[in-house]
Image (cartoon, rainbow, N blue to C red):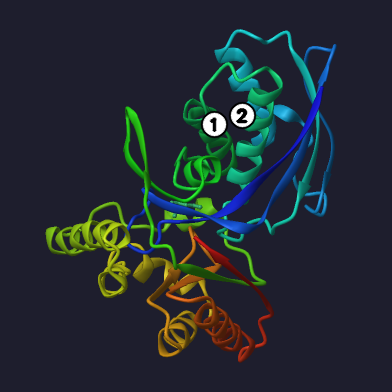
Amino acid sequence: DSIKVFAPATVANVACGFDIFGFAVDNPGDELVLRKTDLKGVKINKIEGDEGRLPLDASKNTAGIAIIKFLEAIGAESQGFEMDLKKLMPLGSGLGSSAASSVAGVFAANELLGRPLAQKDLLPFAMEGEFIACGSAHADNVGPSLMGGFTVIRSYDPLDIIQLRTPKELYATIVHPHIEVNTKDARNILKREISLKKTITQMGNVAGLVAGLMLPDYDLISRSLVDVIIEPVRAILIPQFDVVKNAALENGALGCSISGSGPSMFALSKDFDTAQKVGRAMQEGFSKVGIDSDCYVSGI
Ligand code: HSE
């Protein structure tokens, strides 16, 4: 009565779609082993790869709270679980680390209990994990981590998630500079009001990106990977932002922006070789000021 699951990292926002767009990558991600126990409650045995920074108290841990809320909702509070969590990805990186843990937890619990809920219906519980991690229950990381592929959160209330078809050939490069940005801080610095002019530009890009992915039309994808609202504010949190972005574009990327709330940056490319070359150029941009980084290339 145990299960081992993997939940992938995700790139949220995807330039123009703040809190609505996100896609999953092949790696990195979180690995979680969940076991049924006779003792009531959720117990976290150990967490590896977090340098001791994540809480072992299940009610404060994103994977733990997602399971607790799920058990409450299905009326199975008497079921006990114990878990081992292996973080195979960096924290505070903009790669949906908290989301991957929440998704892994609730997905594993649902499987062990014989799937009382459909996969899509696990989303609100995974969002509880996001809420305790950063004070906001956004779904643009948990959505794609749970469902896979590229997802759109059409609405939060009621929750409405859509999986988009993407071109057969589309690759994501993610470069994670070794600095940390706290999602809560990166949300707090955002402007609360935006002009009508910027809203119209952003809506055009959101519509263009959806159409570009589905047609598919790479030039349209490229023209639409533009964020006039969030990126200009958050770019100041990432040293070398302009240098790294320009390096990606000069080396053939379709577009480049911040992954989630940063500091990781992502680029999309038409083919694998370009995605790799883009990654090397982006890493060079960070290394110019002595910042080490990791690079991941994955199909979407
Ligand atoms: N959409 C969220 C944000 C993602 O940009 O704050 C955080 O990972």
Callout 1: few (<14), some (14-19), or many (20+) C-alpha neighbours within 10 Å? Answer: many
The local secondary structure at tag 1 comes to helix
Spatial distance from mark 2 to mark 1, Cα to Cα? 6 Å
Is residue 238 visible from the viewing direction of this image? Answer: yes
Quickly name the residue at label 2: 66
The answer to whether the residue labelled 2 contacts the one labelled 1, judged by CB atoms less than 8 Å apart, is: yes
Q: Nearer the viewer, residue 24 or 139?
A: 24
261 on left or right of 76: left
Q: Which residue is mark 1?
A: 128
Quarter of the picture holding the N terminus: top right
- Residue 259 x, y percent position in the rendering: 49, 63
Q: Secondary structure at mark 2?
A: helix
The location of residue 68, given as percent across then percent down, is 65, 21
Residue 219 in the image, given as x and y percentages of width and height: 27, 75
Q: Quadrant of residue 98?
A: top right
**Lower sequence index among marks 2 and 1:** 2
Q: Is residue 265 left or right of residue 81?
A: left
The structure residue drawn at horizontal position 51% and vertical position 55%, both measured from the top left corner, is 185
Q: Disc 1 residue type?
A: Glu
Instruction: Give the quarter of the image for residue 233.
Output: bottom left
Q: Along the line of sight, which residue is nearer the eye, 27 or 65?
A: 27
Mark 2 is on which residue type? Ala
Compared to 209, does 219 lie above or below? below
Camera sees residue 240: no
